[in-house]
Image (spheres, rainbow, N blue to C red):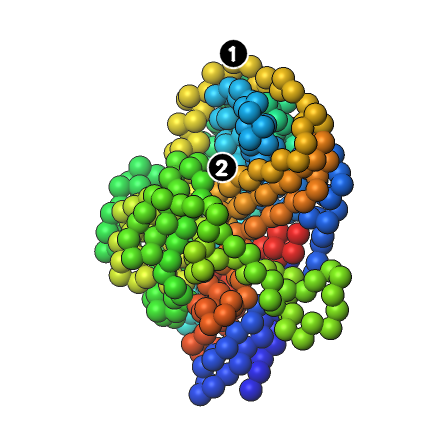
């Protein structure tokens, strides 16, 4: 028997095809069918045009794409022997914008994509999570909207900001701007304390053991209770391999398989398109999605907040992971937990900001003067590690390649190895359970079909 369902209320939509045997999922296919073509659009465009195009790949994580683009362009200069000088002020304003965007996304994801589905599975009644009507749902929407205003103060707008440029940023915030930005983040901290964790953020960040989950209140308590009622700590487990590709957001890059290693070789990242639709090829019987498969050293790895927590040994999530592996419960807890860490880290960055520094230092050479040159960059985005690869000749893009977090997490299988989410879904006992597992990865199909 086969079940096909269109999964909505993700960023975009996906087709989930399930094969059943003995009332369990024996095979799963996650297909992204809405091709967008940004990589093709960027070909033969001036390199600086990418700063306007790539933030529009996604309406949720445009900051991440913008930062990946500007870092890759600056790496072009570096590879040409003309490394740019970037002030600490510009670096902080860039990273702060990325952090604010991630906090906004995590809040929306938890209240609008996970909780409405999870509470439906409970025999108890949990009020407030009904989409468009529930008080907690509406408060989350307001909190996310207020949070993102902190970015718009100095970035000019959100989404699709373009304030980062090679050499720095084109905004020069005043002290009042920074104080206002910090005030918005303080309000988000209060929201986290009252609505998400039900305790002070300092007390929350002092949690070290899974057993301490009992002292959580508010929405995290609701999620914890429903998770164990519906066995979410037992499902959604996959390869239990994790990777973080960039040092930012207060975390370090690294890889976790049987142990944690800080040594990463980006040359070992390889994309495969055996099951991917091709623009110039039709009637490919194997092709069923616009997503490629991406592997590190010939193996699939999960990316995202859970990976960042494990590789950076955040004690509370580390202990939950020790007991329940990479389950739905662990994965969701890690993403919500990251909100607290990012809020505190954003306050640290603001304290380090010196607004008297230059925002922008003009590059001394023009990329149009350079012959063929290539560069890459890696950024930690909402959903995990994001990679941009650029090839340029005389300032014109000859090739642009994007590897998104959802490609890492929702790749089609390669050879006999199952993709991360594909493996997590196999063994599910219902379509609802399979859908919740899929949502736990915070799917972004529009980024994936860029």
233 or 247: nearer the viewer:
247
Q: Contact, CB < 8 Å: mark 1 with mark 2?
A: no
Tell me the residue at 47%/16% (across/down).
354
Could you tell me residue 111's position as x and y percent?
A: 50, 53
Image quadrant where one finds the N terminus: bottom right
Q: Is residue 161 visible?
A: no
Could you tell me residue 300's position as x and y percent?
A: 45, 60
Could you tell me residue 440's position as x and y percent?
A: 47, 60
Q: Is residue 283 visible?
A: yes
Separation of disc 1 and disc 2 at Cα?
Answer: 22 Å
Q: Does residue 395 sit above or below 145 in this rendering?
A: above
| Residue 210 found in image quarter | bottom left
**Disc number at residue 356?**
1
Q: Is residue 350 left or right of residue 326?
A: right
**Helix or strand or loop: what does disc 1 sit on?**
loop
**Helix or strand or loop: what does disc 2 sit on?**
helix
Provide the residue designation for mark 2.
99
109 or 102: nearer the viewer:
102
Q: Is residue 273 left or right of residue 89?
A: right
| Residue 132 found in image quarter | bottom right
240 or 23: nearer the viewer:
240
Mark 2 Cα within 10 Å, few/some/many (few <14, many 20+)? many
Could you tell me residue 397's position as x and y percent?
A: 70, 39
Tell me the residue at 71%/54% (across/down).
36
Tell me the residue at 53%/36% (across/down).
98
Mark 1 Cα within 10 Å, few/some/many (few <14, many 20+)? few
Tell me the residue at 50%/77% (across/down).
27
In the picture as drawn, the residue positioned furthest to the front comes out as: 371
* Label 1 vs 2, first from the N-terminus: 2
């Amino acid at each position: 028997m086969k079940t096909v369902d269109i999964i909505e209320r993700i960023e975009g939509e996906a087709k989930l095809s399930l094969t059943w045997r003995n009332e369990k999922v024996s095979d799963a296919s996650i297909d992204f069918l809405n091709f967008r073509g940004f990589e093709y659009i960027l070909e033969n465009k001036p390199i600086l045009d990418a700063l306007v195009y790539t933030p529009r790949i996604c309406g949720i994580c445009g900051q991440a794409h913008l930062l990946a683009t500007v870092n890759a362009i600056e790496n072009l200069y570096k590879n040409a022997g003309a490394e740019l000088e970037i002030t600490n002020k510009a670096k902080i304003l860039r990273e702060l914008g990325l952090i604010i965007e991630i906090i906004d996304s995590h809040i929306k994801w938890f209240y609008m994509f996970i909780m409405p589905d999870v509470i439906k599975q409970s025999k108890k009644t949990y009020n407030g999570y009904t989409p468009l009507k529930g008080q907690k749902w509406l408060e989350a929407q307001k909190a996310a909207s207020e949070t993102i205003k902190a970015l718009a103060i100095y970035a000019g707008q959100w989404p699709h900001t373009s304030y980062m440029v090679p050499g720095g940023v084109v905004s020069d915030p005043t002290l009042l701007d920074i104080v206002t930005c910090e005030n918005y983040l303080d309000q988000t901290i209060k929201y986290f304390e009252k609505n998400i964790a039900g305790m002070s953020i300092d007390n929350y960040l002092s949690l070290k053991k899974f057993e301490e989950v009992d002292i959580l209140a508010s929405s995290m308590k609701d999620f914890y209770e429903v998770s164990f009622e519906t066995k979410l700590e037992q499902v959604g487990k996959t390869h239990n391999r994790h990777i973080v590709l960039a040092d930012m957001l207060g975390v370090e890059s690294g890889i976790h398989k049987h142990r944690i290693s800080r040594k990463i070789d980006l040359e070992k990242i390889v994309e495969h398109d055996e099951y991917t639709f091709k623009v110039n090829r039709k009637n490919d019987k194997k092709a069923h999605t616009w997503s490629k498969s991406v592997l590190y050293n010939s193996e699939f790895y999960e990316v995202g907040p859970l990976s960042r927590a494990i590789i950076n040994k955040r004690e509370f999530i580390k202990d939950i992971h020790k007991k329940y592996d990479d389950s739905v419960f662990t994965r969701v807890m890690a993403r919500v937990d990251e909100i607290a860490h990012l809020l505190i880290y954003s306050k640290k960055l603001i304290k380090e900001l010196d607004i008297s520094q230059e925002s922008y230092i003009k590059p001394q050479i023009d990329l149009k003067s350079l012959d063929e040159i290539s560069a890459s960059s890696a950024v930690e985005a909402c959903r995990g590690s994001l990679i941009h690869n650029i090839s340029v000749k005389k300032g014109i893009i000859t090739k642009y390649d994007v590897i998104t977090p959802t490609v890492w997490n929702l790749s089609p299988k390669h050879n006999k190895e199952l993709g991360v989410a594909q493996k997590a879904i196999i063994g599910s006992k219902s379509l609802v359970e399979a859908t919740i597992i899929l949502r736990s990865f915070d799917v972004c199909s529009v980024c994936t079909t860029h």
